[in-house]
Image (tube, coloured by chain):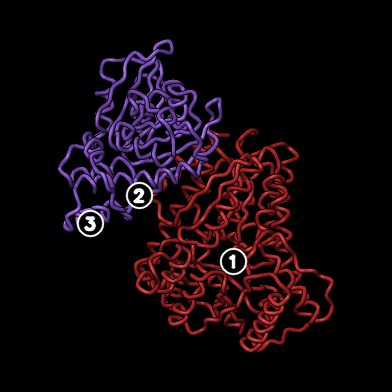
Chain colours: A red, B purple
Amino acid sequence: MSESAYREMWEKLDLDLAAHDGLLEVLGKFYGDIYLSQKGRLNGAEYLDFVLSEVHGLRIKELQDAKAQGKKVIGTFCVFVPEELSLAADAVQVGLCSGADAGKELAEEIVPRNTCALIKSFIGFKLAKLCPFTESCDMIVGETTCDGKKKAYETFGEHVDNMYVMEVPQRKEASDRELWKSEVLRFKDSLEELTGVEITAERLKKGIRIVNEKRRALQRLNALRAAVPTPISGRDVLLVNQISFYDDPVRFTENINKLCDEIEERIAASEGVVPEGTPRVMLSGCPMAVPNWKLPWLIESSGAVIVGEESCIGTRNSRDLVDESGETLEEMLDNIADRYMKIDCACFTPNDERPQNVESMARELDVDGVIQYALMFCQPYTHESIKLDRRLSEAEIPVLGIETDYSMEDAEQLKTRVEAFLEMM
Amino acid sequence: MIAGIDIGSRSMELVLLDDGNIVSQRTLPTTFDPVAQLRKLLDDVAPERCMATGYGRELVREAGLPCPVDTITEIKAHATGAHALHPEAVTVLDIGGQDTKAMSLSKAGKVLKFEMNDRCAAGTGKFLEYTAAVFQIPVEEFGEYALRGENAPVINSMCTVFAETEATSLMARGTRPEDIALGLHMSIARRTVNMLRRVGGKLPVAFVGGVARNPCMTSLLRQLLEADGSDILTPEAPEMTGALGAAMLA
């Protein structure tokens, strides 16, 4: 599709074209520096490059085409929103822009300054008219995973006319499971009302299978990347995880499986992107939404390789599958509710699964250290990072805590910390 | 001859080792033209190789020196230098111009854990320099001056600018300036002790970096850590520790 047709589309979506051009230019340069400069990249990375280069282009065009056919677009910010249901309602589910400093000053007019960068970002993207995904949505689904988001959705809701909030319970008792199940049902009803499509057992079964296949592809990738020498950079795997929220799930699964086939060949030939003996680091903590590549880039340009992301844009999203044995609609909805209740989000109290999961993941991946990444002002994850620091230290797994935001001004300080951490290994 | 260079935000240090012995150590302010200052620092010496550390370490690598240059972080450099000067220390505290670092060390001097201040210069040499200027006292004498204080008022602001506002309002209320100076030192000392505790805070502590020359800081740290005289160790030239460590690792 031609550049001018894209511009016409963006104009229809009421984007601020000049500011949007600026954003795409910065994004393109950033991507060139961080991604295209990598040596020995897999051929399958062409898919990643293509999806990213067309993230505001062809993918948005596809969404418009889907809408023209009567499909609905559901925008989300969190791994708690069951994509299985959206697919069963013949809708498209996409993650919304929240990974870059955009419209920060505007956002700070309507949310407190000490709000995390992710929240400021999705509000800023909306106010500055920069996110074509947000503008394409028929329904935007928020969730109560932290106070910051919870309150921000109230304000955000004043600027969009299709805000919907799911209540995520804060504990994992039987009554919480019941609450969550009722929220899943409420979401199902709302989707049916929005789309006019009845979510039948047959449709839901298909939705479950598609999303499970996507998660299986990510699980396969995560298992393969653990090989020595490391066959794919952590940056690329992060990008795969990021793209899993944007691209069509069936196309994504197919391409990631192809990428995995290529990785298998690499492993068989003992080829890696870094030499054997390169320090292996695992990231743990807050999600890194596109184009938040700062920390992975600093880590991998300091002579280490990332072999795991314990994060919502990482294993927290792909670890658990929905049980596929359900035959009736009721069974399937129960299985969906159960699967999502397994998420070890820091919004839960207690959240004892997460430290266990982090430690066992670090052991399975045989990492030399764990870097905990927290967004500044993110209460849930900064709290857990103190506990995790203690637990990992006791387990004699080196750990470094990083608290940062989306700006680049602390890059040098972060680099010093990361390098010092690697020197300790 | 081997050179260790530590380029910080305020000053740069050079230590020259010959056969493991310090043959020269010198310092210059960093200024806004660090490369010119670096050339001045190395004016009459021709080391075989050089290890650079500190905030400006990449500058040294790019400065086109006539010898091979390698770089190392200030964490490892300070740990190595402090361990060489005070092998008994299991914790290292470095307070420099705009960085504060705390490290715990193994018996062999290996870094086990470290903490650094974030992007803000609160609680660093810069804070002392700024507040000393408010008192119109040279920063080198600020510690002695503060030691004359008796009742330190609590100063909560760790932000340099807000701390000045707090100090000014204390002055307006008639608080003795020496007491205010003591309060300002105490606010840094408390923050520093928190950082030390995050790395374990075991004694003895080697206190290095330019601020280790400040007698009030050493005295307050001793008090807050409930340490006796031999538990807070400061080398003769504490600001040279990073450059020394770098030279030893070259």
Is residue A41 visible in this depiction of the protein?
no
Mark 1 belongs to which amino acid? Cys
Say which of marks 3 and 1 sits in front: 3
Mark 2 Cα shell of 10 Å, populated few (<14), some (14-19), many (≥20): few
Residue A320, image quadrant: bottom right
Query: Element type at marker 1?
Result: loop
Instruction: Work out how far the residue at label 3 is from the one at label 2, CA to CA, in angstroms.
Output: 17 Å
Mark 3 belongs to which amino acid? Thr
Disc 2: which residue? B120
Mark 2 belongs to which amino acid? Cys
Find residue B149 and name its label.
none
Q: Is residue A149 above or below residue A395?
A: below
Instruction: Work out how far the residue at label 1 is from the one at label 2, CA to CA, in angstroms.
Output: 29 Å
Say which of marks 3 and 2 sits in front: 3
> Residue at image x 41%, y 18%?
B49
Instruction: Work out how far the residue at label 3 is from the one at label 1, CA to CA, in angstroms.
Output: 38 Å
> Residue at image x 65%, y 82%?
A187
Query: Element type at marker 2?
Result: loop
Disc 3: which residue? B165
Q: Nearer the viewer, residue B210 or A292?
A: B210
Question: Chain for mark 3?
Answer: B
Residue B185 position, x and y percent, is 30, 44
Q: Give the side of residue B226 with respect to residue B126, left or right.
A: right
Question: Chain for mark 2?
Answer: B
How many numbered marks have been drawn onto this rendered protein structure? 3
Q: Give the side of residue A213 with respect to residue B33, left or right.
A: right
Q: Is residue A360 above or below residue A122?
A: above
Disc 1: which residue? A347
Residues flagged by tags 1 and 2 on a common chain: no
Q: Nearer the viewer, residue B60 or B134?
A: B134
Residue B165, image quadrant: bottom left
Residue B122 position, x and y percent, is 33, 48
